[in-house]
Amino acid sequence: MNQPIIFTIDDDAQVLRAITRDLRSHYRNDYRILSTTSAKEALDSLLDLKNKSETVALIISDQRMPEMEGVDFFKQAIAFFPDAKRVLLTAYSDTDAAIRAINDIQLDYYLMKPWDPPEDRLYPIINGLLEDWQSTYRPAFKGLKVIGYQFSPKSHDIKEFLSGNLVPFQWMDIETSEEGAQLLKLNNIMTKDLPVLFMEDGSFLAAPAIPHVAEKIGLNPVIKNNMYDVVIIGAGPAGLAASVYGASEGLKTLLVERHSPGGQAGTSSRIENYLGFPTGLSGAELTRRAVTQASRLGAELLLPGYVKDIRQKDGYKKIILDNDTCIDSHAVVITTGVDYRKLDTKGIGDFTGAGIYYGAAMTEAAAFRDKEVFVVGGGNSAGQAAMYLSKFAKNVYILVRKENLVSTMSTYLIDQLGTRPNIHVMGKREIAEAAGSGKLEELTIEDVDTKGRETRKADALFVFIGARPYTDWIGLDIIKDEKGFLETGRDLKVYSNFSKIWKQDRDPYLLETSCPGIFAAGDVRAGAMNRVASAVGEGSMAISFVHKYLAEV
């Protein structure tokens, strides 16, 4: 396989030689470095590379060039390699143009000239961009392959599990993929055995259950210790933050996640308002970074791990898994977050996983290219999903019960939706019925005020209608509010049964539940802010309270 390419353009031959020299000295073992002084020649070269099925990982362009400015060059280059990372070389006076380019062309970084020393001002930046690019780069001939029917709930479950756990795979729809059909024929696999997961070593699993998939791809490690200082249940932003801080502060830390890390935030196509990322970042990117960081610092991860109960015995917390394995810990942090609330409408259940999806926009969007897609929900998750789906679908319709999105969605996201001509907001609307034959084919939409109905052709429906806390599994006597969220801290005192449960001489810590040593953080906690940044803050804060609790026992 040919090496991926780093492409550089600068009309100043001296500057071009300098950056080409620095790039080759550092990246020549893994990348080919191509360069030119002409923007027009660069565009011709990119077209040639595209026709040859070459891969361009990174493009670095000067801003001030006589043929065209760097921003204008990138607007044309995106058509050839839209996934290539983009870096603009600028002088101080070009900073405003570079900042505008972040929004106009999704610029990944602008680099001020000169960049000496490259060890401090060039390589760390390029390393990060190439690492991010590699995380989404999919070589056609390498990696896992999933073969199945597009509108099969079992196929959807496997795809969503692999995507959520950041495992690269190639999807092959048996009705359209010649390669997929050939693999089935060569291995004497019947279509009744779909979906099939082909491993990199050539072995395969027919119609596998998720735990079997996890075991096969190495996501189900053996628990290494008999006792932990803290066990964190749930690997959303709060749980990942708690695991990072717990491990970094010397606590023997275990993170248990039932499905895939990242939680609902992990499925976001773009998080625009997270501190320190001016160009935004995807939920998958944030999750990947956090999982890597937690692992590097020494936290153990059990993925997937299904916790069915927490018990107390002799001052220890006993976490019971679904296979009856018992994990002992001094303290527990519950960060199980929330699940998307189910849409209780006629026909919805019949097509869940077969055209109707809860979340999963990142996983399924490409299958609905040039199709009619509907999104239900008015929050940021719905808006981010609509933005991502609009890259593929012919039309995306956002249905909300309110008149508009103003009271439920961030302003920046509403503005972005307005820039996409194929996104249509339908206020005062709700789903009355879903219908189809084997898959979703049409939706009956009702006007909230007039009760008038219309039937629309629909290829897919993505549901984002709020959330319910994932706390039903907790059998311990822990106080919850009327919606099932875990109460913590001083808010516990308003409950009449608190004094019967709490027997400590002190008041509960800020994030402590009614069970001493069991803490809650993130969306699962009553009164949480429902923002990624606040969940990360609560996860890290929970560890400080764990330290205080451990000092007592």
Image: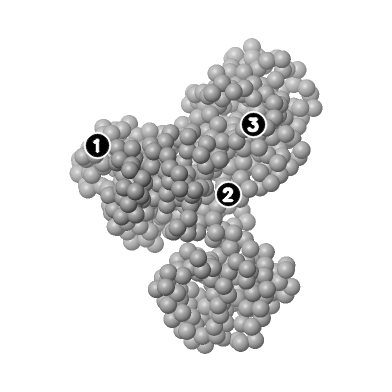
Question: On the rendered structure, is 248 left or right of 256?
Answer: right
CA–CA distance in space, label 3 to label 2: 22 Å
Residue 158: which quarter of the image?
Answer: top left
Q: Nearer the viewer, mark 3 or mark 2?
A: 3
Three-letter amino acid code of the residue under disc 2: Arg
Q: Is residue 548 visible?
A: yes
Three-letter amino acid code of the residue under disc 3: Ile
Q: Nearer the viewer, mark 1 or mark 3?
A: 3
Q: Earlier in the sequence, mark 1 or mark 3?
A: 3
- Give the residue number, with chain letter if any, for mark 1: 433
Residue 126: which quarter of the image?
Answer: bottom right
Residue 116: which quarter of the image?
Answer: bottom right
Question: On the rendered structure, is 147 left or right of 3?
Answer: left
Secondary structure beneath dot 3 equals: loop
CA–CA distance in space, label 1 to label 3: 46 Å
Percent coordinates x, y for residue 146 in the rendering: 40, 46
Assess whether mark 3 and mark 1 are in contact (beta carbons under 8 angstroms): no
Assess whether mark 2 and mark 3 are in contact (beta carbons under 8 angstroms): no
In the rendered view, tell whether residue 227 sits above or below residue 282: above
CA–CA distance in space, label 1 to label 2: 38 Å
Residue visible at 42% across and 76% down in the picture: 47
Q: Which mark is residue 288?
A: 2
- Give the residue number, with chain letter if any, for mark 3: 223
